[in-house]
Amino acid sequence: MRITSAVVEFSCPKDEGRRSRGHERQRYVFRDDQTWSLTAFSLASDLGVQRDVIVNLDRFGAPTDAYVHIHLEDRAEGSGWFLFEPDRVQSSTWNHETGLTHGSMDAGAQNRTFSGHPISCDLLLMAAFDRTSPDKIQLLDNVLLSSPHHFGATGPELAPVKLEVEYLGVETRHTACGDFETDHWRILPGNDRTGHTHPGEDLWALKDTFVFVEAAIGSVGYRYELASFEDVSV
């Protein structure tokens, strides 16, 4: 079993003094049976949004179950558990406005992926990209989010979305923790094909994995950069 731990700092260089926007603490666990999991605590201090998220995945990077807790300022907004079955997704969620809700949604297993909104979760979506296809831009049409809000500040709930994703190849990224060989991914801005309004995002993962290294939302100047990274396997 291998375990890695990292801290990611959020910033906006467009702001005077490169003001910190928050941070995220990430832990990846890679098990001997090739299943793996991501645990993330994400704080967007400029928005007052805290997220505690656990996503468990199979050997192919498809989600098996997940937990999401959202805190806004000094109030618990809601929490939820999601179970991904072959032909559907079930959820049990609580929100301070809607109370306890049990939901079920038909969703085939092919190309299904899930994000609970920490920046590290965005890279989990890339597991649905077909690297054997000659198409460098692909439509992911079975993406499930825990909130339709761009920063995951509502819910949690099941929120389906379509994304266009591009693979841009292998790059070396220079970080505060050293140099990393990475896969460069891009979520394209929303359009008529996807029906969403996300501004788009560049993401870099450790080569041949979906482990977070760096991200940027160029249109608004947001950057997400490693402050620490270590192997903490026991």
Image (spheres, rainbow, N blue to C red):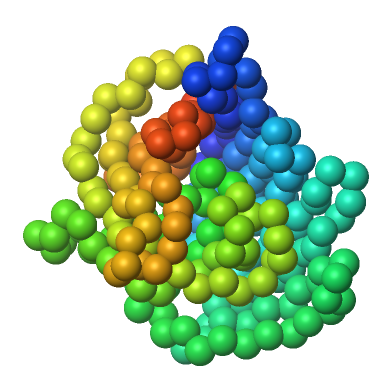
Task: Give how far across and how far down residue 90 sits, in percent.
Answer: 63, 82
Whether residue 115 sits left or right of residue 195 in the image: it is: right
Whether residue 106 sits left or right of residue 72 in the image: it is: left
Q: Residue at x 21, y 36 (%)?
A: 170
Within the image, what quadrant is residue 128 found in? bottom left
Q: Residue at x 84, y 43 (%)?
A: 73
Task: Give how far across and how far down residue 33 sits, in percent.
Answer: 47, 61
Q: Is residue 207 above or below residue 60?
A: above
Task: Give how far across and how far down residue 10 sits, in percent.
Answer: 58, 29
Task: Give how far across and how far down residue 105 sits, in percent.
Answer: 56, 86
Within the image, what quadrant is residue 155 found in? bottom right
Q: Is residue 206 above or below residue 18?
A: below
Whether residue 123 sits left or right of residue 71 in the image: it is: left
- Closer to us: 131 or 70: 70
- Closer to us: 215 or 220: 220
Task: Locate the C terminus and report the quarter of the image it occupies.
Answer: top right
Q: Is residue 86 above or below residue 3?
A: below
- Closer to us: 35 or 207: 207
Q: What count of labels does the image hold?
A: 0
Is residue 128 visible in the rendered image? The answer is no
Is residue 114 visible in the rendered image? The answer is yes
Within the image, what quadrant is residue 206 found in? top left
Q: Is residue 146 above or below residue 180?
A: below
Q: Residue at x 42, y 19 (%)?
A: 175
